[in-house]
Image (tube, grey):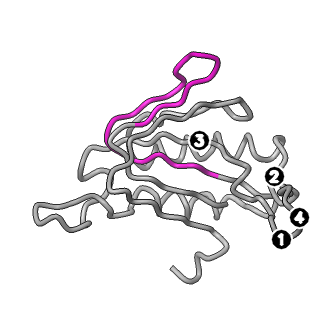
């Protein structure tokens, strides 16, 4: 699994003119799922997201986690995070999981994040043409890949 975590002041997802999820302070998380991903990857990534200390403390240092600032999460499925661009100019998405695997994993990620945070997770709509609006804070953008978890 791959995730791009962005610290935001606010973020929202709109599908067909309807807001499907919106948050104030917190994380906009774009998550991509590949065929090789397992539940252990999902659990590791969810814990990393929730525990990431990138919010400022009273000294302006990034020492606070999501719970410390009362932040929320907007989770968006994003298969394009697995784009392969080595050959040509048209990306290949062959490593991205097909919907029959990706949808249950995405839904499980929502459930796990809700359990870890004790809050409802705002979300996009899997496979939809989503319009994402955000106000980056910092900006702070962190890229995480479960294939690199042994190095973190």
Q: Earlier in the sequence, mark 1 or mark 2?
A: 1
> Would you name the residue on which mark 4 appears?
88
Q: Is residue 7 magenta?
A: no
> Would you name the residue on which mark 1 appears?
86
The quadrant in which residue 35 appears is: bottom right
- Which SS class for mark 4? loop
The reply to whether discs 1 and 4 touch (Cβ–Cβ < 8 Å) is no
Which disc, if any, is residue 15? none
Report x, y in % for residue 12: 47, 31
Q: Earlier in the sequence, mark 4 or mark 3?
A: 3
The relative height of residue 118 versus residue 43 in the rendered view (above or below) is above
Looking at the rendering, the stretch of residues picked out in magenta corresponds to: 11-31
48 or 62, nearer to the observer: 62
The quadrant in which residue 42 appears is: bottom right
Q: Nearer the viewer, mark 4 or mark 2?
A: 4
Badge 4: residue crowd in 10 Å (few <14, some 14–19, many ≥20): few
Q: CA distance from mark 3 to mark 2?
A: 15 Å
Q: CA distance from mark 1 to mark 3?
A: 25 Å
């Amino acid at each position: 699994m791959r995730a791009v975590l962005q610290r935001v002041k606010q973020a929202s997802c709109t599908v067909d003119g309807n807001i499907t999820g919106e948050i104030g302070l917190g994380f906009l998380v774009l998550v991509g799922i590949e065929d090789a991903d397992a539940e252990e990857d999902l659990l590791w990534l969810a814990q990393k997201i929730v525990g990431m200390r990138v919010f400022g403390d009273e000294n302006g240092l990034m020492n606070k986690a999501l719970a410390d600032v009362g932040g929320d999460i907007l989770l968006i499925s994003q298969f394009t995070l697995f784009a392969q661009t080595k050959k040509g100019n048209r990306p290949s998405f062959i490593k991205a999981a097909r919907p029959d695997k990706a949808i249950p994993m995405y839904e499980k990620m929502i459930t796990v994040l809700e359990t870890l945070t004790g809050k409802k997770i705002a979300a996009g709509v899997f496979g939809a043409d989503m319009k994402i609006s955000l106000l980056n804070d910092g900006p702070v953008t962190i890229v995480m890949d479960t294939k690199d978890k042994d190095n973190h």
